[in-house]
Amino acid sequence: MVSVLAGAALVAAGCQDDYSRLKTTRQVRFISEEETWSLALKTSLPIFPAASLRAGTSGPAVATLLITSSGAVLSSKVLQAPDRASAEAFQNAVSGWQFQQREMPEGKLDEGTVTLYFEIRNGSGAVLTAPEKVREMNPAVKTWQTRR
Amino acid sequence: MGWNRTNRLLEVLIVTSACVFAWMTLRQDGAGSNPPEEKWRGASSVLTAGRRFTLQGTAGNRRHLYLGVQTTCLACNADKPFYKRLASETAERSDIDLIVLAGESVEAIDQWLLAGSIAPVERVVRLKSPALSGFVYTPTLFITSSDGTVTDFITGELTPEEEAVIVRRVRGEEQAPLQKHTFAAEATWTTFRQSGAQVLDVRSRKAFRQRPSPAAAHIPVDELSMRSRAELRMYRPVVIDCTREDWGYCRIAGAELIALGFRDVTVILPGEAH
């Protein structure tokens, strides 16, 4: 168990190193979370981790993504998560996300932020995107649908 | 020719309607000390001694005794006999007026005053958004000098000693000004939550980890645009806990929330919650 956790930590640390390296070596443009979601084409959500459900941990998870001009996620970094299992699930899920293609100078990347909500509802785990959560909390606010 | 005249008339009508609408909107909120573009400045913190507070239509050369109440507030109802006494004290004096402020309708407050025989009252003013005018607690009682500076400020249920001091201050007798926020830090946040307010902490993750604020929702200032609407109800008051943070960040956060459509935003500065 300890080795699995240590391994996960190493993987996470590796991802973050890669992320930092890319940020320092490539030209990066920051885009808001709203813009990031509006550019999203495919956002497969993570499954609420069984370990988190057993432990009863829930809450928001925030990640930043480096997105190429073709819309692929080059690297990601989880800034906040309810626990390690949720962070790993989030990190794995976002690596496959697809965003709209954009015209950008060669090698330039967009850095966007995305928030997911890991919630326990009636004893089962649910994962909501930020726009879904906005619609739930403030139904009068106009948001957009994200494709999964 | 006729068509041009109709167009001109239509333009004049539109401009006039816009002006009337703008004027009515400005008047609606009652607290008119700040021009619209400076409204945020008025909403930047809770009202306290030393700040300025003026209402449109109040005489500028007089002192004012303001009473912020709610009909459902237990302490307000408990202090009704004292408010009745204050009304007669101010009626006897020519240099001070009693003005009642509330977030409820004027009719409801009038009935409440009538039931407590609290009269005469110079004016009853409905503040469309009490927190935007600096009110986060009822009852709040404060006195302003003739230039609108708050000289005395007290919140919560009053003790007999405090009542005696207020009466002396109303009479203009020599007495140290009252400056008392009833609530201690933790009680403040409890009060805010009980009143339906959402407490928000906008510090960075690192600062929050070092000194957590378990009572508050934590959203770093640079993530507010999306997360504020996902985690906070826009129609309920938001109180930004700025007691551990640089004021500049909280000001940005407050301005951003207002720009996003949050109507009722208050920032508590260091020292104000104690």
Image: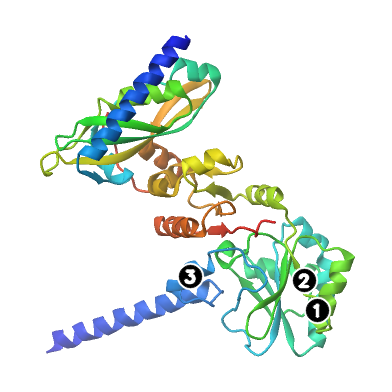
Q: Secondary structure at mark 2?
A: loop
- The disc labelled 1 sits on which kind of residue? Arg
Q: Is residue B255 above or below residue B151?
A: above
Q: In this view of the protein, which residue sits in the foreground, B8 or A26?
A: A26
Q: Nearer the viewer, mark 2 or mark 3?
A: 2
Say if mark 1 contacts mark 2, CB within 8 Å: yes
Q: Residue at x 82, y 83 (%)?
A: B171
Which chain does tag 3 point to?
B
Q: In this view of the protein, which residue sits in the foreground, A39 or B44?
A: B44
Considering only order in the chain, which callout, 2 or 1, is on the residue closer to the N terminus?
A: 1
- The disc labelled 3 sits on which kind of residue? Lys
Q: Which residue is identified by label 1?
A: B169
Q: Quadrant of the N terminus of chain B?
A: bottom left
Q: Which mark is residue B39?
A: 3
Tell me, yes or no, whether dots 1 and 3 are on the same chain. yes
Q: Which residue is identified by label 2?
A: B178
| Distance between the alpha carbons at the discs numbered 1 and 2 | 8 Å
For the image shown, how many numbered marks are present on the structure? Answer: 3
The picture quadrant where one finds residue B259 is bottom left
Q: Is residue A46 among the parts visible in the rendering?
A: no
| Distance between the alpha carbons at the discs numbered 1 and 3 | 30 Å
Say if mark 1 contacts mark 3, CB within 8 Å: no
Mark 2 residue crowding within 10 angstroms, few (<14) / some (14–19) / many (20+) = some
- Residue B109: image location, x then y, percent: 69, 68
| Distance between the alpha carbons at the discs numbered 2 and 3 | 27 Å
Q: Secondary structure at mark 3?
A: helix
The picture quadrant where one finds residue B258 is bottom left
Considering only order in the chain, which callout, 3 or 2, is on the residue closer to the N terminus?
A: 3
